[in-house]
Image (spheres, rainbow, N blue to C red):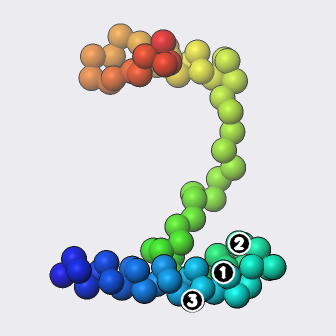
Amino acid sequence: MTKINSSKDEALRIRVYAFFNENRSLGKIFTVRHFMAKKFQGVLKQGSGQTPKKMTKVQLNKLKKAFDDQDNINQPKSLI
């Protein structure tokens, strides 16, 4: 079963790459929109739709305080 899925995935990759090369002058977004319209969301994944934002120092400190002294939550060393 895995071999069938991987061969389908590979065939789709080849198809997407060929389409992109044929329409290279129109850019990557043209290829993405084309395949999204064809309902290939599983192959060309989109983000959440939200714009990423940097946390301010105040927001970061609030987050740290919320996690401080919590035994059930791990905190990466980079945040300390």
Q: Which mark is residue 28?
A: 2
From the viewer's side, name the closer residue of 70 and 51.
51
Count neighbours of disc 1 (C-alpha within 10 A) and say few if under 14, some if 14 to 19, many if 20 or more. some
Question: Of circles 3 and 2, which is in front?
Answer: 2
Spot occupied by residue 62 in the image (x, y as percentages of width and height)? 56, 18
Q: Residue at x 58, y 15 (%)?
A: 61
- The amino acid at mark 1 is Phe
Q: Residues within 10 Å of mark 3 (few under 14, many from 20)?
A: few
Q: CA distance from mark 3 to mark 1?
A: 15 Å
Mark in front: 3 vs 1: 1
Residue 34 visible in the shown view: no
- Residue wearing tag 1: 20
Residue 56, numbered label = none
State how many labels appear. 3
Q: Which residue is mark 3?
A: 38
To which quarter of the image does residue 36 belong?
A: bottom right
Which residue shows up at 36% across the image and 85% down it?
8
